[in-house]
Image (cartoon, rainbow, N blue to C red):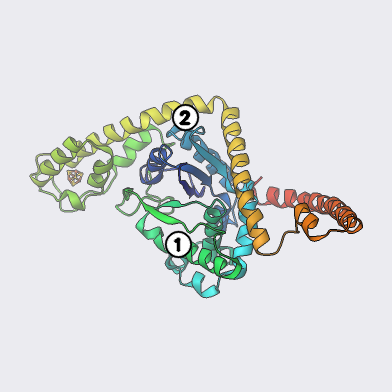
Amino acid sequence: MKERVLSGMQPSGYLHLGNFAGALKNWVRLQDIYECFYCIVDWHALTSNYAAPAPIADYKQDMLLNFIAAGLDPNKCTIFLQSEVKQHAELHLLLSMITPLGWLERVPTYKEKQTEIKDKDLNTYGFLGYPVLQAADILVYRARHIPVGVDQIPHLELTREIARRFEFLYGQGILVEPEGLLTESPKVVGLDGRKMSKSYDNAIYLSDTPEIIEKKIKTMMTDPARKRKTDTGDPELSPVFALHKIFSSSEEIGRVAAACKTAEIGCIDCKAILIKNVLKVLQPLWKRREGLAKSPSVLKDILNEGNKRAATEAEKTMEIIRKAMKLSKITKAEIDINHAFMTLKELLIKHYHDEGKVKAEAAAEAEKTMGIIRKAMKIS
Ligand code: SF4
């Protein structure tokens, strides 16, 4: 039996080369080694985009399209939408009961992002609780391995701490403490040399046309020392070279580096090589996207199937968790053991039958309200 991997991506923008080379390519590789669950974490996108949720629907669609076009195979892995598996929300709530506030306040990205992102009010309960939702995403699948970059280790450590606290309070062997799968995922730089990110406006998107990609790469920063073609440069100081390292062959990387140091190549020619190589990598993905875009029902079916599979697995864990937290009722088998008298048993069974009816009615009422709320927040 394969060990389980869980990973998620937040639909807070269109997918770019950083997502592709930094995560997606690795996901494609992992699906042949592990039992992989890949989640579009749209509730996470709301933690910082709650005031303007409308574009998230488009981002989710773009993400799913690119997942499949990049090579994720629904027969090898489970692809699903977080908001369609309600067990994530339930576990988030339960874990929030046991997570000390101090643990969340000391997560480095909490303060960093609040300082960095000026145009949004992130002083919310949802944003502070983001790592608890992340812990729920992982623990609800009892995933053993989580592909992480070095900067995500504190988040994973928090998940591990929450899992330990849960087991300290409610019993051992209920949850699986996840381990980081430190995989080689390159840090992809953007047009300005900073990490490629939608929020820095320095990204090359998978949905960009070849012409736009060419235009963007032509405007990329280079080693500032190369003011003239005859100036020698240091490729390690050039964002263009950083992308060469990801998209060009080792032969070309070596050639470009040597030629940059001796000024044998100018930046325009160097960028032309990079453009050619980036387009070469993206051509097959675009071709598959084109095919998929013609049959939207295929994507819908993939997601529906993934949602179902994920919910089934999540529910298995939740049943154990509810029991451990004394939230679920005793089972009929337990009634049989504990109550020998038939009359009492019949009474209890009747009670559960009636209770089931009442529960179903209450759930239907609650669902009516949730349907309206999801529509208003653009997540349905
Ligand atoms: S030659 Fe290439 S690697 Fe060197 S500075 Fe110019 S763009 Fe960068």
**Residue 118 visible in the current orientation:** no
Marks counted in the figure total 2
Q: Which mark is residue 155?
A: 1
Residue type at mark 2 is Arg
Give the image location of residue 314, x and y in percent: 60, 49
Ligand 1 quadrant in view: top left
Distance of mark 1 from mark 2, alpha carbons?
33 Å
Instruction: Categorize mark 1 by other alpha carbons within 10 Å: few (<14), some (14-19), many (20+).
Output: many
Using the image as rendered, state which of residue 324 and residue 14 is in the foreground: 324
In the displayed structure, does residue 334 sit left or right of residue 180?
A: right
Question: Disc 2 designates what residue?
Answer: 289
Q: Which residue is at a point 32% across and 51% down the rendered structure image?
A: 187
For marks 1 and 2 on the same chain, the one whose residue lies earlier in the sequence? 1
Secondary structure under the numbered disc 2 in the rendered image: helix
Q: Where in the figure is residue 379, as x and y percent of width and height?
A: 64, 47
Q: Nearer the viewer, residue 180 or 126?
A: 180
Task: For the C terminus, give its image quadrant.
Answer: top right
Left or right of residue 271: residue 164: right
- Quadrant in which residue 346 is drawn: bottom right
* Residue depicted at x 55% and y 54%: 137
